[in-house]
Amino acid sequence: MIRILERSIYRGPHVYSSTPMIRLQLDLEELAELPTDTLPGFTDALLSAAPGLARHGCNGVRPGGLVRRLRDGILIGHVIEHVALEMQNRAGGSATRGKTRSVKGRPGVYNVMYGYDEATSGLVAGRLAIELVNDLLPEHVRGVAGLDRVTTESVMRLPRLGPTTRSIDDAAAARRIPRERLDDLNLIRLGYGSRQKSFRASITSETSHLAVEIAGNKSQTKARLRAAGLPVPRGALATSADQAWEAARVIAGPVVLKPLSGNHGRGVSLDVRGEQAVFAAFDAAAAHGPRVIVEEQYSGADYRILVIGERVVAVAERVTASVIGDGSLTVRELVTRLNADPRRGIGHEKVMTRVRVDARLVSKLAAQGYELESIPAAGATVEVGVTANLSAGGEAIDRTDDIHPENRALAVRAARAIGLDVAGLDVVAPDISKPLRSTGGGIVEVNAAPGFRMHLEPSEGRSRDVGIAFVEHLYPRGTRSRIPITAVTGTNGKSTTVRMIGHILGHTGLTVGITATTGIYVGDHLLDKVDASGPKSARRILSDPMVDAAVLETARGGILREGLAYDRADVGIVLNIAADHLGLKGVDTLADLARVKGVVVRQVRRHGTSILNADDPYVRRMARHAGGRVAYFTLADPAGLASDLIATIESDGTLVVLDDGRRVPIMRSAEIPATVNGTARFNVQNALAAILATYAQGVSPSQIAAALATFESTYDQNPGRLNITREPGFTTIVDYAHNPAALRSLDELITVMRPAHGRVIGVVSVPGDRRDEDILEVGAIAADMFDDIIFRELPDGRGRATGGVVSLLSEGAGSRRDASARIQRIMDEQEAMAAALAMATPDDLVVLLPSDVDAVWQQVQRFASGSRGDA
């Protein structure tokens, strides 16, 4: 029996890998003791059901390595990993990476992980893999729990990137340009923030809407080209068959009829001669729009010239699909054989399109003297494509190296005349290698959103990677697609450090996007007041077109849930590792926690900076796996630190950067309001991290100092982080400290402040999902910190029985001298805060540690204004 316990979609780097993956946590039960070599017939049946597995390598072994390991014996979890990859590849995907790992302390439970191109398809592939493997197992161990059955067709039907979009996406990936698929219609965003671009098919965010409209109106297109002195066919616009015939008589030769607004060759009739043929062609075109173009037909070959930006990047000759008789097969059978070519598919899914057997084909055959059941003579060529368009089954021959330079210039001029940055020009000419003006012919159409299929994999000739040209048009070499990303993690101090960094970068003139526990911010604007320390919020900032630089608070929960929101950062910061959230999601020890938070510095780019707290042993050890240049901040003596970039504090309180041995003074710690005259050492540490983060990004020492001199730890600037006010008539601190390490740091500051105050009153709680020992420790620390304590609970119960948190806090405090006489227990947060404020006298210091920072701050303000009754 296979039991599915959990699933995760890692959209960015995560604890297991730097690449996006899907994780299925499986309990294999008795299968954990049954490798494949103990399952008679399993391997042969598996290879028969999924023959593509024979090409899989495994554990660094070349293709064929998986088969060898299957016969030697591997566990079913590893098999499922490979089958999930193969299912995606069968549907046109390209995922190759995977791994399977046992779960610590849970025998028989495995994390099966595999890469994906598209998350929905990847999930379905995983389900299919489990079903297939299960169906091949011996009956006595067969069975799946926690899974709805699906079919292979459900993978094949999912929206996928077509050849044009895929070529661009691959080219962007090769340049390491960030990209994200925004909808099922293949709208793709490239880049981050203010440097982003987007495209759908070959329409770009730089493409003029007006130009697209002009290109869609063939009459306007011809007028513009003619005005630019470019060769276009003579013709007229008709709204009736009689008008069409009159126009054809004036042209006095073979004509082409096509709808005024159309594409993909729909409604187009070529080489039309005679009144009846014109009437029939008019009806075919009018089915796609009431206005029909009648124009002279040039003689020669049909060419597509692809212009991107200011240059011709590809040329293809389009050839109408045809079959060659063998004297025995009918036309219908010959078309069936033609369509069996694996390069042909339905619509635009493959490089060529299948020829459709329909009324238009019947008419095409009749003009050549054939019917579908006719048997052409051996060697006879029969055209079966209605037009040379690939969408009508046409084939392509690459002619990029053949086009005459004059024709190249003409093509670029035509695209400019219409206003398109990406254009597909349809040209009819006897020979594209000779100047168009000397051989005759001309431009018959200009297409917005031209397809790339004919250039990517022509039927004959060299393939042209036009996706690269497309990406270079949007991002010329040397142009950045990314904005600077600074990611901050740690147990405590993340929000304050993020705010400090954002404040400094904002002073340089950048529009800074910030995610923090208190919300999502762009510049001075709060976009959303939510806990924004996860990857979903980070992606919102990275997709915002106003943002020039991103500073992202990065909590452990989001890393565990779906990984990082980006592939690499310019600066990664780890502030500290302390006991918090232990016992959740497989993170049981400080070493486990360090492994999770270490993802942030592992994903720093090669020329970026990893910033580590040298005073924390768990953080300092991350240097071994950190990306980029490793820098340290420390409140201790920096001697012995193996780095050429260090931020520290000198004995007189001066914050300095030691840059490759050069001393760069920044400012006195007391000059930063948030440090409370330098006494809040945790904010001194946060300031050192912020100084390094901005200094490493080229911000000058004077700019850093000027910005930090205006950074105050107020509710408006940094809500819930050491917000100090005397407005109630006594000193009140509102701070989010909620774990032992944070409480100890706050206690250091209170010890300094205590001589200037009478009693120190505290309202304390811990979220209910923390370990018992952590809650007990907070209770003990609180008993030492405060003269009077109120332990509260709601709204942070998080699954514990009511009273459970308060009881543990009281137990922890009970070990301290006369603590019980100083403790009150008030369950509700608002009531507990009101009681603390009401008991304070002018000399007292009241410390409020809330869950709902906004509500408690407003409560303090109401109390200060005299509304004590509803404090």
Image (cartoon, rainbow, N blue to C red):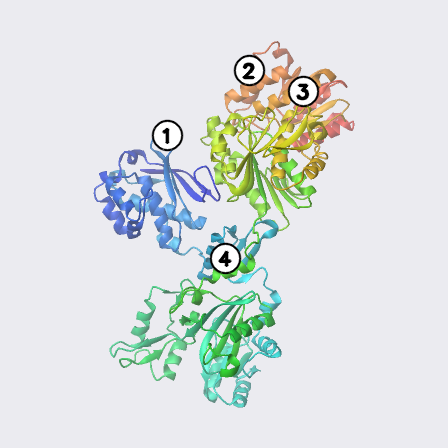
Type of amino acid at the residue the image marks with label 3: Ile
Q: Is residue 721 in view from this perspective?
A: no
Q: Which residue is mark 4?
A: 186
Picture coordinates of residue 122, whole percent (x, y): 41, 48
Which structural element holds mark 3? helix
Q: Which of the two discs, 4 and 3, labels the residue nearer the N terminus?
A: 4
Distance in Å between CA atoms under marks 3 and 1 = 44 Å
Picture coordinates of residue 262, whole percent (x, y): 52, 72
Distance in Å between CA atoms under marks 3 and 2 = 23 Å
Q: Which of the two discs, 4 and 1, labels the residue nearer the N terminus?
A: 1
Q: Which residue is mark 2?
A: 811
Q: Which residue is mark 1?
A: 106
Q: Which residue is mark 3?
A: 750
Q: Quadrant of residue 461?
A: bottom left
Distance in Å between CA atoms under marks 4 and 1 = 42 Å
Q: Which of the two discs, 2 and 4, labels the residue nearer the N terminus?
A: 4
